[in-house]
Amino acid sequence: MITLNLNGKDHELDVAADMPLLWALRDVANLTGTKYGCGMALCGACTVNVEGQPTRSCVTPVSAVVGKRISTIEAVGEDAVGKVVQEAWRQLDVVQCGYCQSGQIMAATALLSSNKTPSDADIDAAMSSNICRCATYVRIRAAIHEAAGKLA
Amino acid sequence: MGKIETPDSATRGILNVSRRTLLQGAGGLALGIFFAPLIRGMDALAAGGPLEPNAFVRIDLDGTVTVLAKHLEMGQGSYTGLATLLAEELDADWDKVRVEGAPADVKRYNNLAFGPMQGTGGSTAMANSWEQMRNAGATAKAMLVAAAAQRWGVPASEISVSQGVVSHAGSGRSAGFGELVEAAASLPVPEQVQLKQPKDFKLIGKVELRRKDSPGKTDGSAIFTQDFKLPGMLVAMVAYPPRFGGVPRSVDSSKAKAVRDVVEVVEFRDLPHGRSGVAVLAKNTWAARQGRDALVIEWDESQAFTLGSEEIFAQYRDSASKPGLPAASKGDADAALAQAAKTVEADYEFPYLAHAAMEPMNCLVKLSSDRCEIWNGEQFQTVDQAIISSYLGLTPEQVSLTQLYAGGSFGRRASSVSDYLLEAVAITKAARDKGVDAPVKMVWTREDDTRGGSFRPLYLHRVRIGLDEAGKLQAWHNRIVGQSIIAGTSMEPFLVKDGIDHTSVEGISNLSYAVPNLQVELSTPTNIKVPVLWWRSVGHTHTGYVAETMIDEAAVAAGQDPYAFRHALLESHPRHRGALELAAKQAGWDKPLAAGAEGEKRGRGIAVHESFGSFVAQVAEVTVKADGSYRLDRVVCAVDCGIAINPDVIKAQMEGGIGFALAAARHSAITLKEGRVEQSNFHDFQVLRLNEMPKVEVHIVPSAANPTGVGEPGVPPLAPALANALFAATGVRLRKLPFPAQIKA
């Protein structure tokens, strides 16, 4: 048994210590909002925030995050910054297929939590490791600026 | 209750055919209001249940309007578009409208653009639903109005409906949809309804309307196949042969079976689509992955495909030196070329491309002796039903398909051979035969998805054009060599004529530019055993590139402005011209492009292309640095897709199409070496990332024409517009995709 703090609550999960956090979330904790995209930390679809830091859950073994605060897309609306980001995403209709957007929103939330007024260059740096194959990038950028405006 | 009165009987409307007419054997199937819900409707009536006047809408007692979407939502906004059409005529409250994926049912949910087939593709979702969904909404509204008229004892013609409220101004009465549902459900479905005039549209054309799938896709609750679970379900992961056509010779599964939570190992081989593999079934995905990686397999590759991309191109160049089958013949292109004052000749090379949807292919199967249930982001319902039922020895009706969101597709989930679905079914059946009777979700890794075939085919074009002394385009000779997407599939009778696969030549065999001598020939190799498939905008991915870069070369050879040269040759194509004019105007084509910083070169290029009935023009502006690296700064896009149903969705599709096309122009290629796919994941099959996305401006050409698609048409013009811009900046013509990272003269 491994105990993980997921979205503010402790969960006991019967998983191998080397299981990536992604599969513990999806297959065992039933938090399927976090997605598998590449399995190699190349696309960002699996992004969750661990102690507020965007983290690729597909390459993070559960043993590495025991005792740490893990937040996922399912609880992003409960976070002051995350809620504003989520609303901006909806206001601008960023999503298309939507599969990568959990990761995008988590990455944007982490960015805006540490930088309230990101420049385009800051957004490039923080968000270019999250792939959107539908190429919703115009709106991702706009939604981050929109959320930053609301948070200012 | 008899005749349903309509608000304005003088208004010319579009007739709808009710289920009763259909039961009586009259025609009108094309309008597609079908009778299957009759039985459900009667059940519901007995229970005092919802109003279900047709296959596309259900209104519950609480007033919730559920739109049944016959089309897959894979990102292109089909759920929102279908709901918009229906809600418009129903005058529903948009906030009370929800969308549900319709089941597979060829009787009710055919794609009217495809003939007897249910499916989503070819950017047809809105075009084929334009009348069907509005009729469905208008029918439901007429019944609610009739119920209110009866209840209040007033003429139906005095009743109005707005935002989900039915009102009678004279008496001051009003009721929500939910209050009228029971009464309405007991009324006959009207024989005919009238549709609104465009001037009365409230939702169609409304920019502010938000997508129906945004909330669920921004809080983790939207369910994709990857997310769907059934009790007792196992996850399967497959070891595939390293080369297409390989089969397992021997399998040692002992290490795989020793992995915690691995349940079984099964093989499948000689499936109708020609693939074999070894699957590990486990209680979770991680165990399946570890088990799969622990398999020790010796592959029999005696029948496997062993050529590389370079050998394929060499073969194609040889084929291009000989005549192919004619796809278009007008005048005498050879003779005109012989007399031309100026000629341009070029070979174009296009690689294989993976779709690389963010959700790798997957499929959930539940099997019993007389039933197969599938959960999938389902793009080709009736094709899949037919192939799976045939494989299992069931009838198509015994195969049910439940529609889930697809995490992208770009054509990948519209497999004419049902490749990944069939494999999932075969695995589930093999497990069942071994006594493991459980639902199975087969999932691919990114590597499986990248290497799994069903690629956009590799193509070679050999093109010669000729101009006369006055710079007038006189001849265009275009040989295309590439695999057929359609040959050998159930669609061959419809899409291959006289040896010409329409999808190989579309966009060039019907070249829009006025040229008196046009020869398009196609050579279709049959020895290349790489599985191929349509990829967002299909043939236009290469024909559009060739047409729009070669016409640019013609303009330069003629000493004319690329915009003016195109414009002059499009006299008989007003919609091409309309898009071209709007893009050029909005981009400020008549003014010089602002200069770059010192050492930088800037360039601007234009392209216009018709695909799937829509017309898109784009102006691309680039900056090339001293080292030859470049940035696409801005794209100005004009689109004519008929009446704009959801302007913001159209805009989003142009933005996304531009980004998708830019990936293929800059980065993406699947290459084979000795039959093996060289790429595996996003580090070597590169797609676009945010830092390379240009600014995009989208302008919609006002139109009263019936709506056409937007999912694909934004793709074809981008790469040629970019190539033309890079030429303008550097003088280098780019005829091989993807482009080099640095453009050097």
Image: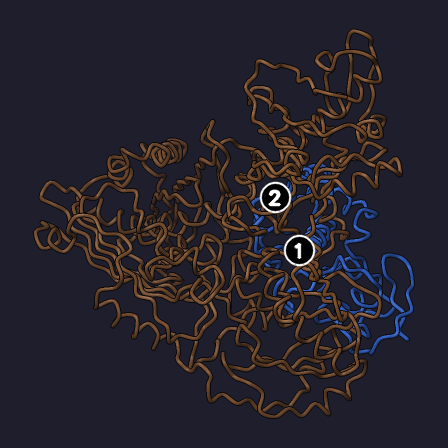
Q: Is residue B131 visible?
A: yes
Q: Residue furthest front?
A: B24
Up/down of A51 relative to B424, above or below: above
Q: Nearer the viewer, mark 1 or mark 2?
A: 2
Q: Nearer the viewer, residue B719 or B569?
A: B569
SS for dot 2: loop
Q: Which residue in the structure is indicated by mark 2?
A: B77
Q: Give the letter of the chain under mark 1.
A: A
Drawn side of residue B464 relative to residue B611, left or right: left
Drawn side of residue B698 relative to residue B745, left or right: right
Q: Nearer the viewer, residue B74 or B230?
A: B230
* Crowd class of label 1 (few under 14; some 14 to 19; many from 20; radius 10 Å): many
**Residue B418: image tag:** none
Quadrant assignment, res B208: top right
Q: Which residue in the structure is indicated by mark 1?
A: A99
Q: Nearer the viewer, residue B696 or B364?
A: B364
Q: Amino acid at mark 1?
A: Tyr
Up/down of B173 relative to B504, above or below: above
Which chain is represented by blue in the image?
A
Locate the C terminus of chain B and report the quarter of the image it occupies: bottom left
Up/down of B403 relative to B182, above or below: below
* Crowd class of label 2 (few under 14; some 14 to 19; many from 20; radius 10 Å): many
Which chain is represented by brown in the image?
B
Q: Is residue A125 visible?
A: no
